Image: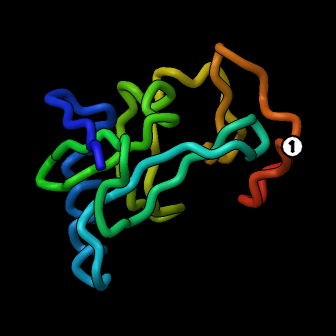
Amino acid sequence: MEIQERTESIVSLTPAAAAKIRDLMATEEDVSVLRVAIEGGGCSGFQYGLGFDRGAQEGDHEFECEGVSVVVDPFSAPYLMGARVDYLETIQESGFKIENPNAVSSCGCGHSFQVAEGDAPEDAAGCGSGCAH
């Protein structure tokens, strides 16, 4: 299995996001990395995926940021280069927010986005987050 180690991070985590991720990982069993990915779908073409995994898969980019082991699959890496994951906790909402310099547009709820290199996939649909796009 070939895992691509990188010295620079594809995705960065704010200290708030890293602290929340470490807290959440401590409550999970048999996980050791944060997987950041994009998937086709969502009302703007792509949607973000954040989740825990047991480890890197073949071809993954693996790096550490703010004390968290992060993996990004090779398909997602170009679309996430330079993205920053933050965690916000306000009276109105709480949750993770991804700031992505590669996104040329995003839906109103912020859970999906489109990049300049291509159009949204034909099967793009509502993102399920209650936005009207």
Q: Position of residue 64 (x, y in %)?
A: 16, 46
Q: Quadrant of residue 115?
A: top right
Tag 1: Cα neighbours inside 10 Å, few (<14), some, or many (≥20)? few
In the rendered image, is residue 85 in sight?
A: no
In the figure, is residue 49 to the left or right of 128? left
With respect to residue 95, does 40 lie above or below? Answer: above
* Front residue of this view, candidates 105 and 91: 105
Seen in the image, is 26 located left or right of residue 92?
Answer: left
Q: Looking at the picture, tell me which residue is in the foreground, 94 or 46.
A: 46
Q: Residue at x 14, y 48 (%)?
A: 66
Residue bearing mark 1: 123
Q: Quadrant of residue 77?
A: top left
Is residue 127 in view? Answer: yes
Q: Identify the residue at image location x=39%, y=32%.
A: 83
> Quadrant where the C terminus lies?
top right
Q: Position of residue 58 (x, y in %)?
A: 36, 48
Amino acid under disc 1? Asp
Q: Secondary structure at mark 1?
A: loop
Could you say where residue 54 lies in the image, as x and y percent from the top left?
A: 31, 69
Residue at 19 percent of width and 27 percent of height = 8
Quarter holding residue 2: top left
Q: Is residue 88 above or below residue 108?
A: below
Q: Give coordinates of residue 18: x percent, y percent.
A: 23, 56
The answer to which of 131 and 37 lies nearer the viewer is 37
| Residue 100 drawn above or below residue 29 | above
